[in-house]
Image (tube, rainbow, N blue to C red):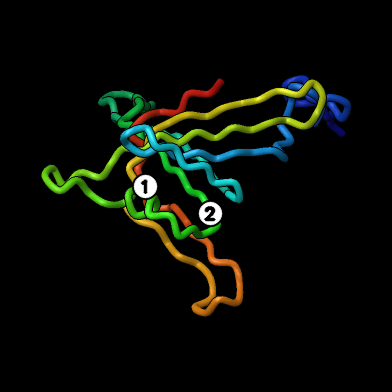
Amino acid sequence: MTDKKPVSGLTATTVGSANKEIVSKLCSLYIQAAGGLQYYFAAAKNWRITPAYRDLVEYVCGTQIPRVLTGGFEGKFEAEVLYTTDDLIMAFITPDATTFELPELTVTSVEKDVNSPQVTKTWTFTIKLFGVERQGPSDANGVVRLKFDRDIMTSAPTYT
């Protein structure tokens, strides 16, 4: 029989306590287009921020242990929002007429912890959005949502 020890000092009394996890019931998602116009998605849900770097493995002659380095940054952002008739959505995915580049968008996710002590955490990063997906019924009987999932992060997130 082996003794089971807590990992990294976590015990049943510390898991889920203040400063261990965020219970974000009051979240806000903002996307700012070029020119400073900011769009607030009041009913955004299920957004995912995945900052990541490519792995770069170099095999070294004469050793069994490779060098594992960091390659280029490859973050992803996904969100599901209520559909709007606002033309701003199309401005997110319309390339410039002369450079054919998509606009760089600033995304801000504000999370308010409802546990004690209450804190606000903010993620800020930039993306280029390559398309949106419409989800919902073809008639007017139901909720229509937009899904942002074809993008590339152009900066690593800052977290405050």
Badge 1 is on which residue? 151
Residues packed near mark 1 inside 10 Å, few (<14), some (14 to 19) or many (20 plus): some
Res. 41 in view: yes
Q: Which disc is residue 116 wearing?
A: none
Left of 152 or right of it: where is 25? right
Q: Residue at x 79, y 23 (%)?
A: 18
**Quick check: 33 left or right of 41?**
left
Residue to which mark 2 is pinned = 80
Q: Residue at x 77, y 20 (%)?
A: 9
SS for callout 2: strand
Residue depth check, mark 1 versus mark 2: number of the one nearer the observer? 2
Let me know if residue 55 appears in the view: no
In the displayed structure, would residue 45 be above or below residue 61? below
* Image position, residue 2 (x, y; %): 84, 31
- Gap between marks 1 and 2 measured at Cα: 13 Å
- Residue at 53% across / 54% down in the picture? 80
Quarter of the image containing the C terminus? top right
